[in-house]
Image (cartoon, rainbow, N blue to C red):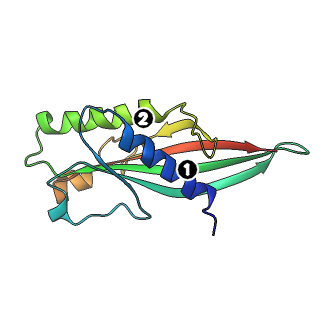
Amino acid sequence: MADAEAVLIAEAVKDLLAAATLSQEIEAERKWLPRKKLSEMEDAIYVTVVPRSQTSEILGRAETAHVYYVDVAVQNRPENLTNAKLDPLAYLVDEIRTLLLGQRLASPTARCIAAKIPGEAEGAIAWPDHLDELRQFTSIMTLTYKLVTI
């Protein structure tokens, strides 16, 4: 059984992240739900890649544009919520955005054309409710991949 394009794109993004040299060591995985138990969050920085949605549009007689949305969640539960602990996590989110934006995947040959961090509160890199209630850093970035087929 063949995998859906959205799954293949999410898997390729996970592989890029797992192979990347970043400022901090991460554990990258592809899942349908970026959830971990709080007790698991203290040991590592978890990066979860989630295929989210897709749209398709006819461009002409022989071309179709497929747009895939992939979420990348960065989660960690530092021992305390100080700037010294949270700033490097925000930097890591920015590193991931920089790494993936504009990157063309080998297979499928989709290209990342946009990266947005909508946050739980518009414009928030880290979700304020998770910081306040769970004492956990959670940032979710939505990547937009475009693939044109003939």
- The amino acid marked with disc number 1 is Ile
Which mark, residue 64?
A: none
Residue occupying the far bottom of the picture: 1
Residue bearing the label numbered 1: 9
Disc 1, SS: helix
Q: Please indicate, yes or no, whether residue 127 appears anywhere in the rendered image.
A: no
- Mark in front: 2 vs 1: 1
Residue occupying the far left of the picture: 79
Residue bearing the label numbered 2: 97
- Mark 2 is surrounded, within 10 Å at the Cα level, by few (under 14), some (14 to 19) or many (20 or more) other residues, namely many
Q: What x and y, as percent, mark residue 36?
A: 27, 64
- The amino acid marked with disc number 2 is Arg
Q: What x and y, as percent, mark residue 143?
A: 51, 43
Q: Residue at x 91, y 45 (%)?
A: 61
Q: What x and y, as percent, mark residue 132?
A: 18, 53
Q: Earlier in the sequence, mark 2 or mark 1?
A: 1
